[in-house]
Amino acid sequence: MSVLKRPIITEKVTAQGGQGKYAFEVALTSNKVEIKKAIEKLFGVTVESVHTMRSIGKSKSRTSGGKFVSGKTSTIKKAIITVAEGEIIDIYGEA
């Protein structure tokens, strides 16, 4: 199983890209050392710090066709990566 799942591309994270900070969704069981090694291997950058957070899944309910439907969103883990001064991660695939 891969440590990195996908990059998180939001307005807030894109604004922090100029400061060398990037966000990724990672596996729930991964730790900071594994995340750092995966980023350095995949993108070839030097990682200065890794901050992690868990977003706990929430219960959702709605009505559909006159019936009551309930479910739950998934729990995810996010990692905020800070790279060394002057290095960038090309998430968008631009040359």
Image (cartoon, helix red, strand yellow):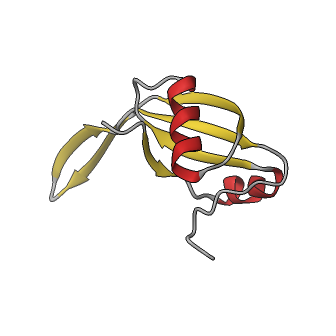
Percent position of residue 95, x then y? 63, 76
Q: Which residue is drawn at 70% across and 54% down?
A: 12
Q: Which residue is drawn at 58% across and 36% down?
A: 79
Q: Is residue 10 left or right of residue 34?
A: right
Q: How many labels does the image show?
A: 0
The answer to which of 35 and 26 lies nearer the viewer is 35
The answer to which of 54 and 84 lies nearer the viewer is 84
Percent position of residue 49, x then y? 72, 31
Q: Which residue is drawn at 84% across and 47% down?
A: 85
Q: In this view, does 76 lie to the left or right of 9?
A: left
Q: Quadrant of the N terminus?
A: top left
The answer to which of 10 and 60 lies nearer the viewer is 10
45 is higher (above) or lower (below) than 30 = below
Percent position of residue 37, x then y? 54, 34
Quarter of the image holding residue 58? top left
Q: Is residue 63 left or right of residue 33?
A: left
Q: Which residue is drawn at 50% across and 28% down?
A: 34
Q: In this view, does 27 lie to the left or right of 19?
A: left
